[in-house]
């Protein structure tokens, strides 16, 4: 893997993570993400893909290796408000209205009331939740909550959006609709996205590249470049190329998931 | 329900001719209450002031200590076993001592007892609220570059409110108990606890009962005020959602 260029949005260099319990979650991860890319991390449970996302976001530190975001160390990038994060749970604050949840990061950044109001309206337009400003989070459906969470993450124009299985808890239909919406938002906002998922079709549908990780300790097993045309839509999922790529990712996953089997096959040949 | 109990009480005390010193009839109590209303009201207010003063002091300190312990976890972990052990001390037993310390007639001697009683439930509950926050909420704050101050301001304090009010409601009741029991060990004659005690010693049981009724009414009102404040500040919490929104 080449040393990352300074133009990379995210540059992960030789990152390993061993927890205090002795579990090695990640071993020698190298990854370059270009500005404006949509990169999915996919892999079996416990492959450390969420840990990798948290290391990029400076929520946990790596045991070794370095992460640069927009040419800065991850820690600096976090303090510079370069990150918007969306978790599997929407993590909305029940004591705040929808509007006040979306404006929370703006409040922390010291935006004026008028600026916040204007931006909240803009963001709720973007996620199609106008009219729910004064609703409370618990009054919304799971899909709507996650849209609020996305609006909040994008409200302050972070250059990097980190998403940790954001649609994992939603039903298939809501998920597919939100996938479409996310693509529309991403194309409009122009930010870089790192997206952790369990779903192969979701990863292929959304991404410019899919990073396939192997089972513990997590390594980058393969990177599948998704060359599906944009804008992608409902028809994309029926495209022959879509199925080819889904198969490619599935095979890469299977290879990474059972290293001993691959070895055995290798010996036969 | 309340009316049924009163009617039964009235009926039974009349039917079995129960002695007044055992249990006066509700009508006798009401009568005595009416005859002594200004005296009782005056005494009651005095005691209520002690209770509220002790509540403010003890709960305020409880919240403050909870904030410090939540902020400095290591200190908190070291301190908690002592706090729990101290909580098992029957604090009422100290009432004669505080009377001695601050002076029998000084309202602060009763406030001190009420304050100590209020401190623990408020502190323990608030601390639990401040520390039982979903890890993702904290990570979200971190991702915005927010430090401890932001985490407390935007996450820990708001989410601790329902817990804090659980403590405050217990404290409101305890403060009234603390003030009255403190007065049983001596105090100015215009205090409700003292007048209840004196009434029993001169066998004016209806008036003693009238004093107890007033103490109960004040206690319930105080609790009600705290519960109302809770309702207005934590209407978002699952336990009180049925009142608002939806």
Image: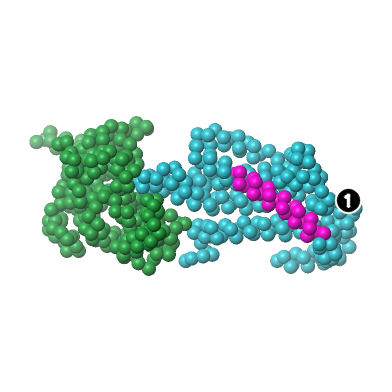
Position of A29 relative to A143 (above/below): above
Q: Number of numbered discs present?
A: 1
What color is chain A drawn in? green
**Residue at horizontal 43%, vertical 54%?**
A93
Q: Colour of chain B?
A: cyan
- Residue drawn at 26 percent across, 50 percent down: A159
Residue A17 shown in magenta? no
Where does the magenta region start and end? B39-62
The x, y position of residue A229, in whole percent, is: 13, 58
x, y (%) of residue B127? 54, 44
**Image point (68%, 47%), residue name:** B54
Q: B36 or B136: which is nearer to us? A: B36
Left or right of A132, for residue B212: right
Instruction: Give the secondary structure at mark 1.
Output: helix
Chief secondary structure of the magenta portion:
helix
User: In this view of the protein, can residue B143 be seen by the observer?
Assistant: yes
Is residue B188 positioned above or below A20 on the image? below
Residue B113 placement (x, y as % from top left) = 71, 43
């Amino acid at each position: 893997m080449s040393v990352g260029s300074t133009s990379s949005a995210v540059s992960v260099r030789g990152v390993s993570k061993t927890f205090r319990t002795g579990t090695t979650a990640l071993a020698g991860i190298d990854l370059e993400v270009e500005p404006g890319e949509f990169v999915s991390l996919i892999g079996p449970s416990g492959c450390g893909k969420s840990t990798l996302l948290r290391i990029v976001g400076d929520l946990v530190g790596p045991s070794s290796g370095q992460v640069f975001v927009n040419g800065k160390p991850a820690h600096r990038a976090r303090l510079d408000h370069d990150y918007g994060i969306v978790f599997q749970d929407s993590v909305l604050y029940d004591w705040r209205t929808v509007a006040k949840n979306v404006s929370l990061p703006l409040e922390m950044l010291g935006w004026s009331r008028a600026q916040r109001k204007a931006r909240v309206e803009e963001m709720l337009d973007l996620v199609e939740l106008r009219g729910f400003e004064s609703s409370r989070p618990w009054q919304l459906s799971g899909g709507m909550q996650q849209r609020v969470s996305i609006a909040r993450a994008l409200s302050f124009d972070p250059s990097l959006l980190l998403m940790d299985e954001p649609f994992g808890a939603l039903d298939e239909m809501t998920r597919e609709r939100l996938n479409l919406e996310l693509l529309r938002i991403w194309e409009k906002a122009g930010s870089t996205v790192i997206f952790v998922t369990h779903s192969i079709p979701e990863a292929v549908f959304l991404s410019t590249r899919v990073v396939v990780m192997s089972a513990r300790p997590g390594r980058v097993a393969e990177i599948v470049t998704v060359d599906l045309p944009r804008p992608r839509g409902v028809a994309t999922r029926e495209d022959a190329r879509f199925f080819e790529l889904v198969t490619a990712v599935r095979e890469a996953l299977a290879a990474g998931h059972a290293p001993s089997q691959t070895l055995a096959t290798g010996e036969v040949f | 329900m309340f009316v049924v109990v009163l009617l039964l009480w009235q009926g039974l005390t009349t039917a079995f001719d129960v002695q007044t010193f055992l249990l006066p009839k509700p009508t006798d109590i009401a009568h005595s209450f009416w005859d002594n209303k200004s005296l009782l009201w005056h005494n009651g207010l005095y005691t209520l002031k002690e209770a509220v003063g002790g509540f403010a002091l003890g709960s305020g300190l409880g919240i403050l200590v909870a904030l410090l312990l939540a902020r400095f976890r290591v200190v908190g972990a070291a301190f908690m076993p002592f706090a729990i052990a101290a909580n098992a001390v029957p604090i009422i037993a100290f009432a004669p001592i505080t009377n001695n310390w601050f002076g029998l007639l000084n309202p602060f001697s009763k406030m001190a007892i009420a304050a100590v009683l209020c401190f623990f439930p408020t502190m323990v509950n608030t601390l639990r609220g401040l520390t039982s926050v979903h890890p993702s909420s904290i990570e979200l704050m971190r991702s915005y570059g927010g430090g401890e101050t932001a985490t407390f301001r935007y996450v820990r304090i708001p989410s601790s409110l329902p817990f804090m009010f659980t403590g405050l409601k217990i404290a409101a009741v305890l403060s009234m108990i603390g003030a009255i029991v403190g007065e049983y060990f001596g105090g100015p004659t215009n205090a409700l606890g003292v007048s209840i005690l004196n009434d029993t010693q001169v066998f004016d049981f209806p008036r003693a009962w009238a004093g107890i009724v007033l103490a109960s009414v004040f206690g319930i009102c105080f609790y009600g005020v705290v519960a109302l404040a809770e309702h207005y500040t934590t209407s978002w919490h699952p336990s009180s959602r049925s009142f608002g929104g939806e």
